[in-house]
Image (cartoon, rainbow, N blue to C red):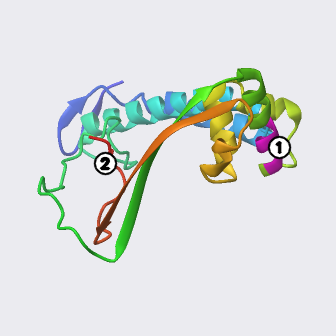
């Protein structure tokens, strides 16, 4: 289909709304049918990704057609200009940040995964053992569930883990740090 754009002349990228609308409808239908179970997340994230791709294609086509962005989407890889100064912040301020690392030896993976599932069900009492099994299925996911409702001390006491070492860094600042920069050099 060819249309005349008032700003850029003739272009052929006008057919993009249909795939976007189809992806939006499919995602809404999927979302409305969800029951909140963990097994539904894979389909949800796949649908969400398809919707995002369709929306970006629609926005790109609209831009090509007449130089307008109908949906303000951030670039997929944050291609936006970086406004941060490369200067080190002055020490001091009224905010304290604490960053740490804790290393553990996995001594019993099965026991650790079970501890993660128990922690999950304690945090989400309306969920099922099936939900817990999906959320805590390996040492990493089990540790995440143990930490979800508690602090790092819970890992020191978790069955299947042996604490080895830890390190913590502290610094004060003015609160302007947005937390996106990785604090480990």
Is residue 164 within the magenta segment?
Answer: no
User: Which mark is on residue 78?
Assistant: none
Instruction: Say whether residue 140 is left or right of residue 88.
Output: right
Instruction: Say whether residue 69 is left or right of residue 84.
Output: right
Closer to us: 54 or 31: 31
Q: Which residues are magenta?
A: 117-122
Residue 39 seen in render: no
Q: Residues within 10 Å of mark 2 (few under 14, many from 20)?
A: few
Q: Is residue 125 above or below residue 176?
A: above
Residue appearing at x 72%, y 32% in the figure: 135
Residue underneath mark 1? 121
Closer to us: 147 or 78: 147
Residue appearing at x 69%, y 43% in the figure: 146
Residue appearing at x 15%, y 58% in the figure: 88
User: Which mark is on residue 181?
Assistant: 2
What is the x, y in percent for residue 128?
88, 37
What is the x, y in percent for residue 18?
51, 30
């Amino acid at each position: 289909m060819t249309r005349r754009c008032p700003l850029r002349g003739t272009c052929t990228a006008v057919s993009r709304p249909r795939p976007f609308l189809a992806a939006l409808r499919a995602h809404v239908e999927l979302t409305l049918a969800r029951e909140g179970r963990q097994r539904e997340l894979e389909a949800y994230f796949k649908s969400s990704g398809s919707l995002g791709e369709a929306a970006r294609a629609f926005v790109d086509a609209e831009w090509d057609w007449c130089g307008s962005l109908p949906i303000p989407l951030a670039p997929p890889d944050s291609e936006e200009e970086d406004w941060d100064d490369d200067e080190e912040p002055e020490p001091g301020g009224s905010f304290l940040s604490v960053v740490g690392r804790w290393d553990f030896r996995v001594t019993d993976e099965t026991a650790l995964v079970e501890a993660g599932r128990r922690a999950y069900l304690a945090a989400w009492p309306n969920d099922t053992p099936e939900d817990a099994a999906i959320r805590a299925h390996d040492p990493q996911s089990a540790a995440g569930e143990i930490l979800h409702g508690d602090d790092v001390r819970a890992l020191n006491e978790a069955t299947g883990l042996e604490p080895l070492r830890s390190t913590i860094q502290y610094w004060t600042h003015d609160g302007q740090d947005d937390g996106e920069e990785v604090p480990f050099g």
